[in-house]
Amino acid sequence: MNDRVFHMVAGAPTPVAPFSHAVETGGWILVTGQMPTDPANDAAPLPEGVEAQTRRVMDNLGLVLAGLGLGFAHVVQARAYLTHFERDYAAMNAAYRSYFEPGKLPARTCIGVTGLARGALVEIDFLARR
């Protein structure tokens, strides 16, 4: 297990807990779940509504991917976490889908949870492959 590389990406949001932005091993990249925080200002309020929060989360994930020389086309699996599953599922999907090429969506799991850090409505993590 000494082939692991722990990545902290300049310009990506400051982690809200003790973790790396991504861990890479054998061409696989596990991207830590991103919150809808402003990468330029950790103290800024979160965007209003799940669509805006999903876009911020996806933009933050894009920053991490880009920092590793990757893009959304490299994503093979995603996990999304929603605090208001029934209410926000459709709006989250609409925003999420727009980041991927039609017909090339990663495998995905979407989970309803009771809470997320900073009171966020959505968090998403990725598994990518070089």
Image (cartoon, rainbow, N blue to C red):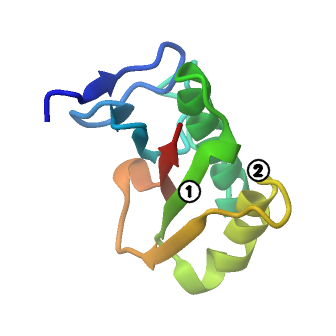
Identity of the residue furthest to the left in this view: 1
* Left or right of 40 in this view: 105: right
Mark 2 vs mark 1, foreground winner is 1
Tally of numbered discs: 2
On the image, the x and y values in percent for residue 77 come to 52, 60
Looking at the picture, how far across and down is residue 69, in whole percent?
Answer: 60, 22
**Which residue position holds label 2?**
99
In this rendering, does residue 99 appear at all? yes
Left or right, 23 with reference to 120: left
Q: Dot 1: what SS? A: strand
Query: Which mark, by number, is residue 100?
Result: none
Label 2 secondary element? loop
Q: Amino acid at mark 1?
A: Val
Amino acid type, mark 2:
Tyr
Which of the pair 85/45 is nearer the observer? 85
Q: Residue 93: which quarter of the image?
A: bottom right
21 to the left or right of 78: left
Q: Locate residue 31: give its quadrant.
A: top left
Residue 76 image label: 1
Label 2: few (<14), some or many (≥20) within 10 Å?
some
Tell whether 21 sits left or right of 5: right
Q: Residue 2 appears at what percent x and percent y?
A: 14, 28
As drawn, the residue found furthest toward the front would be 26
